[in-house]
Amino acid sequence: MVYESLNNVVPTLQREGWLVVDTSDKTVDETIDHILKRIA
């Protein structure tokens, strides 16, 4: 639900350098792994 409201601004946030990660279906460890892979 929160991510639905962000859909319109995600492209802008990404252009500004934000890493937007939908963690709805991820555990904490999976989220951390995902982030580390994206910034490596």
Image (spheres, rainbow, N blue to C red):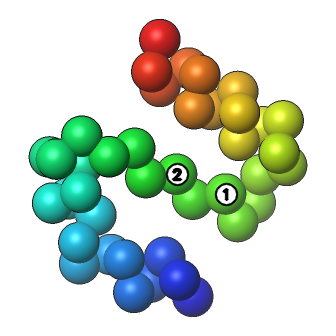
Name the residue that disc number 2 marks. Answer: 21
Q: Are marks 1 and 2 in contact (CB under 8 Å)?
A: yes
Query: What element does badge 2 sit on?
Result: loop
Relative to the observer, which residue lies in front, 26 or 17?
Answer: 17
Q: Number of callouts in the render?
A: 2
Q: Position of residue 4 (x, y in %)?
A: 44, 83
| Viewport quadrant of the N terminus | bottom right
Q: Position of residue 5 (x, y in %)?
A: 39, 87
Q: CA distance from mark 1 to mark 2?
A: 6 Å
Q: Residue at x 57, y 59 (%)?
A: 22
Name the residue that disc number 1 marks. Answer: 23
Position of 1 relative to 31 (above/below): below
Query: What element does badge 1 sit on?
Result: loop
Q: Badge 2 local density, few (<14 within 10 Å), some, or many (20+)?
A: few
Q: Residue at x 53, y 83 (%)?
A: 2
Q: Residue at x 47, y 11 (%)?
A: 40
Q: Position of residue 10 (x, y in %)?
A: 28, 63
* Direction top: furthest residue: 40
In the image, what residue type sits under mark 2?
Val
In the image, what residue type sits under mark 1?
Thr
